[in-house]
Each structure stands twice: as structure tokens, then as C-alpha cells.
Image (cartoon, grey):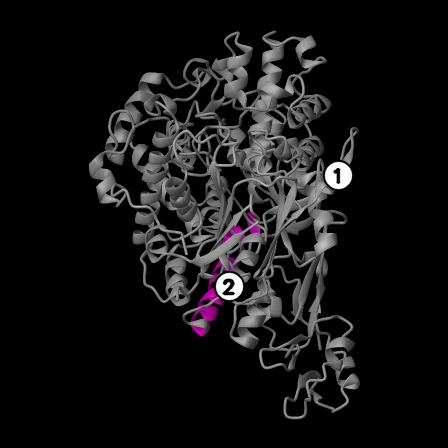
Amino acid sequence: MKLATQEELCSGCSVCRVVCTLENFKAVQPARALLKIRGEFPDPGVYKIQYCTQCGVCAGACPEEAIVDHNGIYLVDKNRCTQCMICLESCPFEVMITDDAGYPAKCTGCGKCAELCPREAILEAEA
Amino acid sequence: MQYGYAGKILKINLNSGDYSAGSIPKELSDQYLGGRGFVARILYDRLKPGTDPLSEDNLVVVATGPLSGHLLPGSGKTHFGALSPATGGYGDSNLGGHFGPNLKYAGYDCLIIEGAAEKLSTVIIDDDKIRVVEDESLRGKGAIEAEKALKTRLGDDFQIITTGPAGENEVAFACISHDFGRQAGRTGIAAVLGSKNVKAVAVRGTGALPVYDSAGAQKKGEEMYRVCYSKPGFKTWTPYGTASLTDWANEVGAFPTRNFQSSYFEFHHAINGQAIRDHLLVTEKGCFGCPTPCGKYGLAETTVGKAYVEGPEYESIATLGGSCCLESIEEVAYANYVCDQLGLDTISAGVVVSFAFECYEKKVITKEEVGRDISFGSLEDVIYLLEKIAAREGIGEPLSKGVKHAAAVFGGGSEKYAIQVKGLEWSGYECRNAPGMMLSYMTADVGAHHNRSWALGYDISESDADVSALISAGTSGELGVATPEGKVDHVISMQHSRPLFDALGICRLQTQEIGFETEHYEEVFELITGRRVSWEAMIGISERIWHLTRLFNVKHIEGFGREYDYPPRRLTEDPVTTGPNKGRFIKREILDRMLDEYYEKRGWDKNGVPTEETLERWNLNNGQVVDLRW
């Protein structure tokens, strides 16, 4: 699914980040999450959500055309990827990471974050 | 491999700057689980009788539990402990936020801070890179201010605990702060950090936790969140958090008011959960893994100043609002903010300040000694005293050691209304109509604290319903099932079940407030650790810890025994002055009988010391020390 957010509802709980790495990497390792939560404290005291909007900038930057649009969700094709990491650097939301095998990883649109968010701060985007 | 745990205990020696990390002895995790269990066992083994709490021989132990950092509700809790400068006995406290999970992701379930640094320092744990960095620039900075400075310098992905000036100055109720509004408040552990010249501990953890059945644990964890979302309290309790107790506590006459002269505050409607939503709220702020964010982060504007603050929690509303008689939520929140920056436990601070107000009213302390007129209900006077206390100046010096000590210094009969047990100030429930809750406060291991046994439900409605259900049901007919009979069993049971969450490293509020069933924790524990341990067996571990912390007090407080378990004479002699319980108090003879029954059921002698038989049953008498040398 494509994601949308209602940031003002975010409580900073990081449930999204924990379920993200479990779903995508079978690991409890929020440092590797494919989205980020940033607190702005003490003032103004709100949370910001950096997430993959499926904008396609990474795909456009990739010299190997290894990031491919699958019905609006961009996915990394590891067979074509040369691990140059230009995509990582190009991501406007800084939400790509390097996986254990050295490949870039990005949001797969699995929707687990939206499914589990206690606050409806992350949701499935309307079509 | 101990699945669920990060796997290591980290010891840092501040004298040498050296550190070592080693695996958790299996006997420690088997018999003590983690969190509060590790804290109690390590402190008991390592500290010699006669240790001065503010000397470098004291330790600060920080421990997460096997469930901390995993995908399940409330998995963000961390426990702290030390020999308490307030009581001279066992001290511990707990906070949420994100520190504990990150300590685990860095590879450590537990951190032991030994010795003392020569200069004011920050301990930095960056995965496996450990440094102790001198930093005089942080001296005197508010706890919130210091966290902001360190986040800016080190990076947003560091999770940081700090002390305020009160900790640096070794105030007996200085608190540990974290995540811009969470505190490990009680028993003065930040004073111990101050005596070690530690201003902050910062951790960044980027690793993963070992899970026995990752797919199964993920599925179960997701189910646990969905169960929470289906509870009625999820929608009704969450918006108000702990402040939801304010009106109820007044309606049942259990709200500390005017230094516990009364148990009803006529302005409670102006300082309740709705007042927070109407006048303060900016963000519903949650701890790691929390489905029910109870943190109410907001902006308080008063004539004295304006500040962002998380809270006030019920306890702060009770002690700064009720006990100090502040009549608006903005004033309570701002007083809370001052405590947060200074790094003072709001519970003890509220009780200490209200004690000072009463001493002044009764002319036990003079204007000359105080430095000005002071009175209940004045925010400026509250702030004046808080600042004096944090700086340990003038009247702040005796007050900084807590009401028990201050009463001994002030004399004039003030010890009668120094509301404390064992040297720790009473928290937010007035008990002259609640014998079960009274016993809870008398026998809590750290001193007068409510977070062990919360027996008030039984005193009001003979019910262990979750709090949101109790509040919805209102009071039941005749106020106060104020009989001492039948209460001891409930107190003992809760002294095991509630602190068990502190050993597991998780929050108890989903269970306590919205009725989330404990069976779920049993199931997810097995999926995460690969070990089947029944909730009943875990309760047994919690009971072991209970006897151990009692033993700790016997070991460290000279002459410790029954006399340390009594409440102040206000509660056994002075009638409540106003409200639904006007005229009530509980005679000492009744408490004597309850204590007799309590000790017998606990397997302690008539002086409240665990018997040899009890120690043997819980494997506490073999003189063994858990070996933490690697």
C-alpha cells in the first residue's frame, strides 16, 4: 500500500519502526527501519514522520534502472543493483538503509506500520 | 544464548574509565528475570553494610528486562537502583521513554556504574564504543536543557538520561530525567549520580535482539496490540492518562490536600485530566512500544512564566496541586516544569514543600529562616522553595534531605505531619479511610510509595477491576469499605504482581488501567525467549525479589524492623479535616493487627524480618553471590 500520515497524532512510540524491521528483515532492530520518527522537543513538542512516499526519486537516480515501479510501489531489483548507493543518497526523506548483504533497502509498501499504528498517525493513503 | 535478552552486563568504573562486559549468569536471569530483579540482586551482593549512599562505594544499576525493546505493548521500561540517600535502604525507580530499548540494541541488558569521576562527566555508549567524557559545560544545566544540548551535540538517535542541578547537588529526592518529560523519580538515585559526577548517560544502539521464534513473536506481538485497541479503556483512558484519577480520588476522599490535613480538594475540577486537555495539551506523548500514550505534553502559561512540560501526572497533581493547594492546572504544570528542570521528584518535592508551608503556618520555622513569607496556594512560594532546595541554600538545606530529616531539624512537633515512611515521602493517596492502601504504603520496600501495592480499589469497592472500570463504576454505596479485614492478602498479592512488570521490563498500565490480560505476556515470553515460564512462576520470582529487598533493608539500615513500617502520627491521630472522609483516621492498634497478619503471611518474624525458613524457600540464605567477574 501507499502510505499517508497525520503527524499531529504521532506519539513517538516507534511501534511502526519495530514492526517494519520484523516484517522486512525478520529482526527486532529499529535502527534499520525504513521510516523514521523525529521528535522536536522541548519546543514545539511534536513528532515528525519521515516515510517513503513512493516518489520515485531513487529510481530516477539509479544508474542501473534497478529500482522498479510495481503498481506505484518502487522496489529494488537486487539482480540489477551494483550497490553503488546513489539511491540512498538521493532519497529526499533519508529513509533508505543498507541491508545485511550490502544492498540498499527501501519501504516495500507492506503496510504493517499503518496496520499497527496505535494512533492512526500512519495510514493507508487514499487511492 | 539467552533469547530475548541483549546478552551482556556492562560495568563501567568511573575512577579508571575502564569498562568490561560479560554474559548474564544464567542463575541471575533464571531466578531474577531482569529489571528490578537484576537491580536488587546486584545491589544486595555488591554493597557492604555501612556504605555511605553518597560515597563512591555506592553503585547505580540500570536494568532492562527480557521483554524490553520487543514488539509488544509497553515494552519500553527501564529500572534504576542504588542504596538510597533518602532512606539509607533499598532504592529503585523506573521510567519509560526509549533509553532501555536502545541500551539493549547496543548489546546490554544491564549497566553497572561504579566509583566516581573526577570531573563532571557524560557516559557515552555508542553500540560497543564506551567513553566517559568530561564536560564542565553541562554543570548547572536543567535536566531538560542538558538533554537538548546532548541531543544536538551527539545526534537525535541517542537516548539520554540526565540529572538537573538537584542531582549535581545531591538532593535526597533528585530524579533521573529522560525524553523531555519522563523521570525515574523516587529514592534520590540522581543524587547518587551527582555524587559520582555523572551528569548524563547517552546510548545509541543499532543492533538487533535475538528472538527464539521471530515469526511467532511478531504475530503474537501484533495480536497483543489489537487486543489493546479493542479495550473500552483504550479510547476512554488514553486521552486523560493518569490524570483521569483526579476527580475519582476526590470523590472517594483519597486526595492529599494541604499537607495531608484533608483528603478532598475543592478545586480538583480545575486540575484534572479535562483541564489538561482544555488548557495545556499539544501532543499525546508515548513511550517506546506504547499503545496508550499517557504522556500529556503541553504548554503551561502562568503569570510567573511559560513552559513546555510533560504532565502533570496524577501524582504531581496530588502533591503539587492538592498538597500544596495550587488551584489551576497551569500552575500545577508550571510547578511540575520547575521540578523537571531542577531534576526533583515531583512527589517528594510536593510533599516537602507542603510540609514547609505547614511548618511556617505553625511557626515552627520563621520568616527569617525561610527568607520570606510562604503560604499554601502560592506558585511563587512553591518555586522559591524548589529553587532553595535544589541549591541546598538556607531553608533549602534541611528540606533537601526530605521531610523526615527536616522535621528532626525543625522540631516543634513537626514530625507528626512529616508524611513519610522510612524517609521517603508519601505519594498521591490519602489513606485515613483506606486501611489496605495504608498497609501498602507502610510496607512498600522503598518507603511510602503506591506503585507496589495499589490496594485502594479494594478499600473503595472490594474490586480489582482495572482503574478505568473503577472510575466508570464510581463509588459503591457506603464510602470506604474501611475494614482492615481481608486486605492483607490483596496487598501481598499486588506486591508481587505489580513489580513483576519492573522485572520483565515492561509497563503495567495496559493491564492496570485498561484490563489487558497477563496471559498474553506469558505467551509472548515463550515465543521470544524459547522458555516456557508460567505467570505463576514469574510471580514467584517477584516474591523472591520482595524478600530480598526486605533483607537489603535489614542489612543496611541499623536496627531495621517493625518500627520502620509505621505511618506518621497525623494518619493515626488527626481526623481528616474536610470532604467525604471528614473525621476519619486509622488508629495505630488497627495497623498493629494488620502488620501482625502481614508478617505472619509473609513468613517474617514479629519484627518484620524474613525467617530462615522463608529465606531457604526462596533460595536467599545460601550466602551465594552472583559472579559478575569475566
Question: Is there one chain holding both mark 2 and mark 1?
Answer: yes
Kindly identify which residue carries mark 2: B71
Measured as percent of width and height from the top left, residue B277 is found at 68, 43
At mark 2, the secondary structure is loop
CA gap, disc 2 and disc 1: 34 Å
Q: Quadrant of residue A102?
A: bottom right
Q: How crowded is mark 2: few (under 14 residues within 10 Å), some or many (20 or more)?
A: many
Residue sitting at x 66%, y 78%: A106
Kindly identify which residue carries mark 1: B307
What amino acid type should be assigned to the residue bearing mark 2?
Leu
Which chain is mark 2 on? B
Quarter placement of the C terminus of chain B: bottom left
Residue sitting at x 53%, y 31%: B54
Residue sitting at x 45%, y 46%: B512
Asked whether residue B220 is drawn in magenta, I would say yes
Sequence-wise, which precedes: disc 2 or disc 1? 2
At mark 1, the secondary structure is strand
Asked whether residue B491 is drawn in magenta, I would say no
Residue in front for this viewpoint, B320 or A92: A92
Residue in front for this viewpoint, B64 or B111: B111
Magenta segment: B215-237
